[in-house]
Image: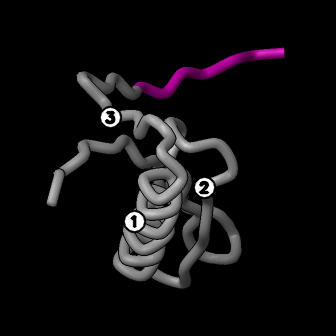
Amino acid sequence: MKTYRMAVVIEKDEDGYFAFCPQVQGCYTAGKTYEEALANIKDAVQLIVEDMQANGEAVPSAEAVSLTTLEVAV
Protein backbone atom coordinates (compact mmCIF):
# COMPACT_ATOMS: atom_id res chain seq x y z
CA MET A 1 0.00 0.00 0.00
CA LYS A 2 1.45 3.34 -1.06
CA THR A 3 0.72 6.63 0.69
CA TYR A 4 0.20 9.85 -1.28
CA ARG A 5 0.29 13.39 0.10
CA MET A 6 -2.53 15.47 -1.36
CA ALA A 7 -3.38 19.12 -0.92
CA VAL A 8 -6.98 19.90 -0.09
CA VAL A 9 -8.70 23.26 0.27
CA ILE A 10 -11.74 23.67 2.49
CA GLU A 11 -13.73 26.89 2.29
CA LYS A 12 -16.67 27.98 4.40
CA ASP A 13 -19.68 29.24 2.48
CA GLU A 14 -23.32 30.04 3.24
CA ASP A 15 -24.34 26.37 2.98
CA GLY A 16 -21.52 24.85 5.06
CA TYR A 17 -18.12 23.85 3.72
CA PHE A 18 -16.82 23.21 0.20
CA ALA A 19 -13.70 21.06 -0.25
CA PHE A 20 -11.56 20.28 -3.28
CA CYS A 21 -8.24 18.72 -4.21
CA PRO A 22 -6.37 20.97 -6.67
CA GLN A 23 -4.13 18.12 -7.85
CA VAL A 24 -7.03 15.97 -9.02
CA GLN A 25 -9.23 17.69 -11.59
CA GLY A 26 -12.92 17.45 -10.75
CA CYS A 27 -12.35 16.22 -7.20
CA TYR A 28 -14.62 18.23 -4.93
CA THR A 29 -17.32 17.74 -2.30
CA ALA A 30 -19.13 19.56 0.48
CA GLY A 31 -20.28 19.07 4.05
CA LYS A 32 -22.37 20.79 6.67
CA THR A 33 -19.37 20.88 9.02
CA TYR A 34 -15.62 21.19 8.50
CA GLU A 35 -15.13 17.64 9.76
CA GLU A 36 -17.77 16.27 7.37
CA ALA A 37 -16.22 18.09 4.41
CA LEU A 38 -12.76 16.77 5.36
CA ALA A 39 -14.04 13.19 5.63
CA ASN A 40 -15.88 13.53 2.32
CA ILE A 41 -12.87 14.88 0.43
CA LYS A 42 -10.67 12.13 1.87
CA ASP A 43 -13.14 9.52 0.57
CA ALA A 44 -13.35 11.24 -2.83
CA VAL A 45 -9.55 11.45 -3.21
CA GLN A 46 -9.14 7.82 -2.17
CA LEU A 47 -11.69 6.62 -4.73
CA ILE A 48 -10.11 8.65 -7.53
CA VAL A 49 -6.58 7.46 -6.64
CA GLU A 50 -7.77 3.84 -6.58
CA ASP A 51 -9.31 4.36 -10.03
CA MET A 52 -6.12 6.00 -11.33
CA GLN A 53 -4.04 3.08 -10.06
CA ALA A 54 -6.42 0.54 -11.61
CA ASN A 55 -6.06 2.33 -14.96
CA GLY A 56 -2.26 2.54 -14.73
CA GLU A 57 -2.29 6.34 -14.50
CA ALA A 58 0.31 8.35 -12.62
CA VAL A 59 -0.99 9.62 -9.29
CA PRO A 60 0.06 13.18 -8.39
CA SER A 61 1.50 13.84 -4.96
CA ALA A 62 2.10 17.23 -3.30
CA GLU A 63 5.70 18.08 -2.46
CA ALA A 64 4.91 21.40 -0.82
CA VAL A 65 1.81 23.55 -0.56
CA SER A 66 1.50 27.24 0.16
CA LEU A 67 -1.85 28.85 0.79
CA THR A 68 -2.64 32.46 1.45
CA THR A 69 -5.51 34.89 1.17
CA LEU A 70 -5.47 38.32 -0.36
CA GLU A 71 -7.81 41.27 -0.62
CA VAL A 72 -8.65 42.83 -3.96
CA ALA A 73 -10.28 46.24 -4.12
CA VAL A 74 -12.21 47.06 -7.29
Q: Secondary structure at mark 3?
A: loop
Residue at 60 percent across and 72 percent down: it is: 30
Residue 33 x %, y %: 45, 81
Counting residues from the N terminus, which is met first, the one under dot 2 or under dot 1?
2
Tell me the tag on residue 46: 1
Counting residues from the N terminus, which is met first, the one under dot 3 or under dot 1?
1
Q: Nearer the viewer, residue 41 or 74?
A: 41
Q: Is residue 57 left or right of residue 27?
A: left
Residue 4 x %, y %: 24, 46
Residue at 37 percent across and 76 percent down: it is: 39
Residue at 42 percent across and 48 percent down: it is: 8
Which stretch did the figure color magenta? 68-74
Mark 1 surroundings: few (<14), some (14-19) or many (≥20) residues within 10 A:
few
Separation of marks 2 and 1 at Cα, in angstroms: 10 Å
Reading the image, the residue beneath label 2 is: 27
Tell me the tag on residue 61: 3
- Kind of residue sitting beneath label 1: Gln
Q: Is residue 60 left or right of residue 4?
A: right
Separation of marks 2 and 3 at Cα, in angstroms: 14 Å
Q: Secondary structure at mark 2?
A: loop
Q: Is residue 68 left or right of residue 27?
A: left
Q: Secondary structure at mark 1?
A: helix
Q: Nearer the viewer, residue 58 or 44?
A: 58
Counting residues from the N terminus, which is met first, the one under dot 2 or under dot 3?
2
Instruction: Identify the image quadrant of the N terminus.
Output: bottom left
